[in-house]
Image (cartoon, helix red, strand yellow):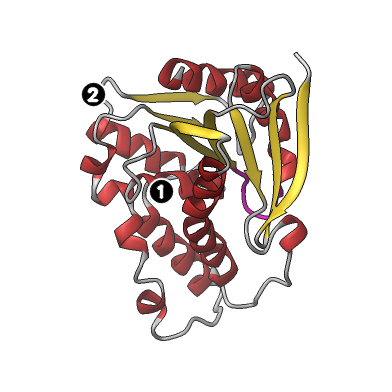
Amino acid sequence: MKLSIEEYTLGTIPILEVVSEQNKHESLPLIIYYHGWQSSKELTLTQGRYLAREGFRVILPDAFNHGKRKNPMTDIPSLTFWQSIHTNLFEFGYIVDFLQKKGLADDRIGVGGLSMGGMTTTALLTQHPEIDAAACVMGTPKLVAYRERIFKHASQMDRFFPHDYNLLLKWIPEYDLSLQPEKIDGRPLLFWHGREDVVVPYQHVVEFIAEHGDKENIQFIEEDEAHLVRPETMEKITQFFVEAML
């Protein structure tokens, strides 16, 4: 299958769009797939190709402070990180709205992402019932716990934190899927995580699955990997979306 890979800017969002050349002007099921921390949309292109070959229109955005939107990283711990996720949350609906109004996306919507993009994915599930399926790859549904983890590590290094740190990040509990798992509401949700991951805690997902993994709609794939996704994993993610949305 010949694929169309187009790069453009939607508003201020640099995007790679991957879709079948033959069907690129048709209304198709949509997947928005988010990259990880200090990465870029280009590094999710292989996953985008896998998904597009199955009939999806795949949108790969650059997160704020990343890729073509890269800015100097602030010395204040986690500010750039959470700002990037927060902006993803602001922009998600804008991307969907644009494509649907253009007649390029139907009402089937999937979301996925790596690491920071996986956190974006679980956060979106808390506020967007229109999402049909989601894949959190090397991310965490426990945003509050991750916020506390960053604070603990940076404090041990004697880094500066604003005294109102939690207040400035007050939005996070409202987007923490582990605090409101009922928001999953039966939708297909895939977690993939490496047991040797030291960047985003594998244990976060293990704990979430221990509490909610008895539900048929939630899948958990764990492997002897670090913070790394191989082509074999991308194939599993693709198959998940095919079964969930097509």
Q: Position of residue 240 (x, y in %)?
A: 47, 20
> Left or right: 220 with respect to 11?
left
Give the amino acid type for the residue marked by disc 1 in the picture. Leu
Residue at left offset 39%, top offset 63%: 148
Residue at left offset 62%, top offset 48%: 36
Q: Badge 1: how crowded within 10 Å, few (<14), some, or many (20+)?
A: many
Residue bearing mark 2:
214
Residue bearing mark 1:
124
Q: Nearer the viewer, mark 2 or mark 1?
A: 1
Residue at left offset 32%, top offset 47%: 177
- In the picture shown, does residue 242 fall above or below 175? above
Q: Main secondary structure of the magenta part?
A: loop
The boundaries of the magenta stretch are 34-40
Alpha carbon separation for disc pair 2 and 1: 22 Å
> Left or right: 216 with respect to 90?
left
Task: Work out whether mark 2 precedes mark 1 in sequence or the reverse, and give the earlier one.
Answer: 1
Residue 136 visible: no
In the rendered structure, does residue 26 fall within the stretch colored magenta? no
> Left or right: 150 with respect to 213?
right
